[in-house]
Image: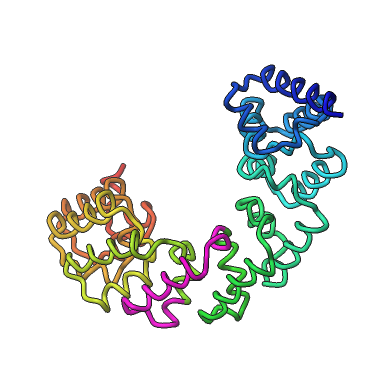
Amino acid sequence: METSSTHNGSSMMWFFKDRGLDDNSIQGIFRRCKRLESVNKERANENWEYLRSIGIQERKIPSVVSKCPKILALSLNEKIVPMVECLRTLGTKPHEVTSAIAKFPHILSHSVEEKLCPLLAFFQALGIPEKQLGKVILLNPRLISYSIETKLKEIVDFLASLGLNKDGMIGKVIVKDPFIMGYSVDKRLRPTSEFLRSIGLSELDLQAVAVNFPAILSRDAKKVLMPNYDFLKKCGFQDKQIAALVVGFPPILIKSIQNSLEPRIGFLVDVMGRQVDEVVDYPCFFRHGLKRRLELRHKLLKQQNLDCSLSEMLDCNQKKFHMKFGLLKLSN
């Protein structure tokens, strides 16, 4: 028996070498999956070829196998194929399934009946439409590895505690940001929600932010949100104004200060000659590109000696902007 295992291990060593893996990578694979030492080379080859046949590029398969070596030891027809076929029914584009597998190969080691089906039922019960289920699972395939009872329900209960337990709001949050389900309630989600309250967001404000931009809840309050808040304070915004900015444009707390916020505020004040208070009425000012939208439109308005609010200037596409200010001839 030991001789057979040694023979298989040696055989698998050459199997990996033939596919371009170096010794360190091979040793790492064996460390992560002792079972491979006794795996039949034919099974490993069959599984490898199957991964290639479903659209995973040959050069990416070593990475997939390194992440989850036991893929080569699993029964192809009993485990891998059923999961792939089920995932294909969830996808709308050919590459979505292969992309999910490359991102989290362990999904193939889970059972369709014991893990995937209960997960889909859990999300459907939260009001996520069937058409959106695939987007959630394929965007964050790691979801299949989480316990519904000890992990996912805890996060759902937390979102419900924010007042999101009506009109399918929790489902909408998960569809917008499937990755939120992977964070710790106590270490990340709750501290961040408490920070948002501390800077002046009401319960309704917090609910609006969670639904419109749930990714903000999973950001580290001290490392990411606090520096942006301090920067806005330094620019002269009052607490109520910052709260209004966050509700109107939540990404303002995660945008790069150096590359996004500072250049835009500098342009607003130094070039446009406006007060910082003006963006409180139009927080989406920070969404627009500096060169492609702000600088270009300001230049055109200045040439014609025209004056308008930020929303009038920016809250329309290029054609409507030119029509609104009679600039069609100038753009031709």
Q: Which of the 4 image quarters holds residue 310?
A: bottom left
Q: Is residue 112 left or right of residue 297?
A: right
Please tell me which residue is depicted at 46% across the width and 75% down the height of the picture: 208
Residue at x 87%, y 29% (from the top left corner): 1
Across the whole image, how many numbered discs are drawn on residues? 0
Is 317 or 82 nearer to us in this picture? 82
Image point 62% across, 75% down: which residue? 168
Residue segment shown in magenta? 179-206
Residue 326 on the magenta segment? no
Q: Residue furthest front?
A: 2
**How has the structure been colored for display?**
rainbow
Left or right side of 112 for 285: left
- Residue 249 position within the rendered picture, expressed as x and y whole percent measured from the top left: 37, 66
Where residue 173 appears, as percent x and y from the top left, is: 56, 67
Residue 66 placement, left or right of 8: left
In depth, the one of 285 and 62 nearer the eye is 62
Give the image quarter of residue 221: bottom left
Q: Residue at x 57, y 60 (%)?
A: 182
* Secondary structure mostly taken by the magenta-highlighted segment of the chain: helix
Location of residue 91 in the rendering, given as x and y in whole percent from the top left corner: 71, 49
Give residue 160's quadrant in the image.
Answer: bottom right
Measured from the top left, where is residue 161 in percent x and y?
Answer: 54, 81
Q: Is residue 254 left or right of residue 89?
A: left
Nearer to me, 64 or 260: 64
Residue 199 in the magenta stretch? The answer is yes
Quadrant of the image containing the C terminus? top left
